[in-house]
Image: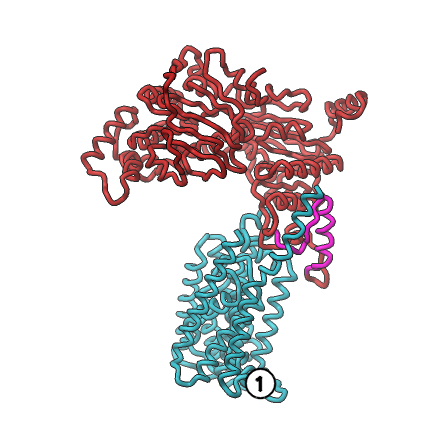
Amino acid sequence: MSILSETRKSAPKLSLDRRYLPVLGTVVVFVLMLVIGGARYENFLSPAVLSNLFINNAHLIVLAAGMTFVILTGGIDLSVGAVLALSSVITATMLNAGIPLSLVLPIAILSGSIIGLGMGVMIQYFEVQPFVATLAGMFLARGLCFIFAPESVPIRNEGFVALSSWGVSSGRWRLTAAVVIALLVVAASWWVLHRTRFGRTVYAVGGGEQSATLMGLRVARTKVMVYVISGTCASLGGILFAMFSRSGYALTGVGMELDAIAAVVIGGTLLIGGMGFILGSVVGVMVLGLIQTIITFEGTLSSWWTKIVIGVLLLVFVVLQRILTLRRN
Amino acid sequence: MIDSTSASRAEQITVQHSQPTNPTVQMAGITVEFPGVKALDGVDFRLFPGEVHALMGENGAGKSTLIKALTGVNPIAAGTISVNGSSMRFNGPADAREHGISTVYQEVNLCTNLTVAENIMLGSEPRRFGGLDWRTMRRQAKVYLERMGLDIDPSSSLGSHSLAVQQLVAISRAMVVDAKVLILDEPTSSLDTDEVEQLFTVMRQLRDDGVAILFVSHFLDQIYAIADRITVLRNGQLVQERMKDQLPQRELVSLMIAGTSDAQVSRANERVAVTERAADAKPLLQAVGLGRKGAVQPFNLDLYPGEVIGLAGLLGSGRTELARLLYGADKADVGSIKLAGEPVKLRTPRQALGRKIAYTSEDRKGEGVIGDLTVAENIILGLQAARGWIRPLPTVKATQVVDAYIKALGVRPANPNALLKNLSGGNQQKVLLARWLATAPKLLLLDEPTRGIDIGAKTEIMNLVSELAEQGMSVVFISAELEEVLRLSDRIVVMRDHEKVAEIASTPEVDVPRLIEIIATGEEDK
């Protein structure tokens, strides 16, 4: 027995690092981009630029947080961009109709939760592919936007304007309400994923649904819940985006679900599920944001280069993940 | 153990066992029905505290069904289950687990992406401030691991450990809920000898702590090393429950497989004459030291043209694994294959097919027939595969081939355009045979070709096999029914615990009891 245990003792230390490897890769890329940007452009590493990185992407951070839950279970949510638009349109039209802010915000957030619940039930109990179910959710949400308001609706509600322009600054660092909310969402997500049985079940489902069931974990409930969480995050993201743009518009967030997925994948979460970290997703969003910033700073480059760089990065990260998983087996 | 103590104590224990007052689990008259089949028919089963109870039976005997009936995976049509005297019905493994009945499956059903600590503790994890208390969790997990004699880091991920360790972690998990009953469903199938010994140490310790252990294994030696009591199931019915000491291996094996034969097949005078091999005959295929870890121990085997080799052994003894090695469906770790004296490498079924070796799977539904294609399409499939997709088979030729085989094998209905799924099992098997015969193989590996088909079709297929051999084909015939093996084979290879233990000529002196003895003892000579 002692021989057996001794030979097994040395193994785990190395593998522990491997779980963090994809995230470490993301952090390295992020730091590398900061260094390159800082070396090439003046004022690149200024507090204003870095603050804006968060301010411009607060909604995407929230989307990516919700998406992380879904992808960790091995699913996908294509509806988040449309749900974001729906929530922003609901917020704008209802506020303009004179409904109080304290009622509008919960309703807007709930709209995403309900769509998420519907998709989750379809996926879990009717065994519809997540891709198809959330595609349906995407069309549904996008169509509903136009029923509320086909045109862009500017928001004039005083309370909402005050909320969106609220911020704390220290020197040239600035934090808006949206950023604070986004960071709170990230903190809550981290706590849920790492400190609750539900969170660990999310990982367990991604690692092997049948095993998780046989371990007596509540798989069905968890799988539905991740879509509710993702939908809720998306509608919260819609409010943040409305705060950012002071309007609600049916055509916002087209393709934003793909940005969120890209951020999560670049952030080191395995698309097959079971492995990844919420903080990785945040860094993933930051990497996407930095690409955009660098291209703005470059000045002469067309903004389409953003997509090209994201595409290349995605490819590299997916291949890297593949190599990692292949080696694991 | 028991036998090392004094005789009076042993007697005491026997008395204690033979007059059990309160079994932990008592299942009575359990009947489980699946559409069209009675998987379990009024089975009684008892589990006593502080005992390892082995559940034995061949494929389809109902072992897993019984376990699933207990844990509530399969609904029970009739019968009662009582745990510690009170009547119970569980609605799933999780529910059973909460009532102290934990199951560890053959394939480790844990999450390899989570840490060892989580895999042990999730479901009954310690909490602090409303969230998981990781530190306490790791500490508690460590305690359970130490009980298993495992010194591993609880915060390492489970996937970084060997299967054996994962298996022990699974048992640790079972112990967290203070399991009164531990069900081990073939836990040893992927473990090596040392690891099995470690598992047994743990099992003995748990048994001495009063845990009732239900143990399923196909390895007879392991059963006799660890079990106290043995229950034998056959065809969904209880055959017998007995203390291990009162059930010799030979009797156990005959309980497991005897009686499955049909009088029609077992008539000894129907035995096909043993072909005399010419003295200068050259083997068609020679396997030298061929083996694969965890599947078959290295073995030598010569196959001659015109000869039928029967493979006998219990389920899980390595019969199928041996055939798959010869066919290249599984890759051998060691050894080599010579075909007509030439060394060859068979890495894929396609290469084997190119060398005129054909294999019909025991899993007819999963690996063989394609139900949504017609009889004709199924027959020409193998022929077409051998030609390659570039050169389609001419329609006229295809029709000729199909008609010829339908007639020769007596496929009914004799309609080449019938969908295969609408044919009976026996006729599906004939079509499958036709598929491989159409490729004109020199070596035909038949894995359980007679399973689940009616007696008439069985006889037809067996007659066909002996005709093929007479025409010079070399045949390997695998069957769970020893009478069939005896009747057809020129030579019989006996498999036991993944090892080729004997190779005997099928002389008239060799009969079923003799074969059973070899299977049970693993020895050729008495």
Residue A266 visible at all = yes
- Letter of the cyan chain: A
Q: Nearer the viewer, residue A87 or A262?
A: A262
Q: Quadrant of the N terminus of chain B?
A: top right
Chain to which mark 1 belongs: A
Left or right: residue B107 versus residue B198 is left
Rendering quarter of residue B97: top right
The residue at the point 30 percent across, 24 percent down is: B409
Q: Quadrant of the C terminus of chain B?
A: top right
Query: What color does chain B have in the rendering?
Result: red
Rendering quarter of residue B84: top right
Amino acid of disc 1:
Pro
The residue at the point 56 percent across, 72 percent down is: A106
Residue B456 visible at all = no
The relative height of residue A231 versus residue B93 in the rendered view (above or below) is below
Rendering quarter of residue B371: top left
Q: Which residue is mark 1?
A: A47
Instruction: Tell me the magenta residue range.
Output: B132-158
Q: Residues within 10 Å of mark 1 (few under 14, many from 20)?
A: some
Secondary structure category for the residue under label 1: helix
The relative height of residue B322 versus residue A150 in the rendered view (above or below) is above
Q: Nearer the viewer, residue A35 or A149?
A: A35
The relative height of residue B276 versus residue A234 in the rendered view (above or below) is above
Residue ranking furthest to the left: B396
Residue ranking furthest to the bottom: A171
The residue at the point 43 percent across, 12 percent down is: B267
Question: Can you give x and y, in whole percent of width and height, for residue A63 in the image?
Answer: 51, 70
**Magenta run includes residue B157:** yes
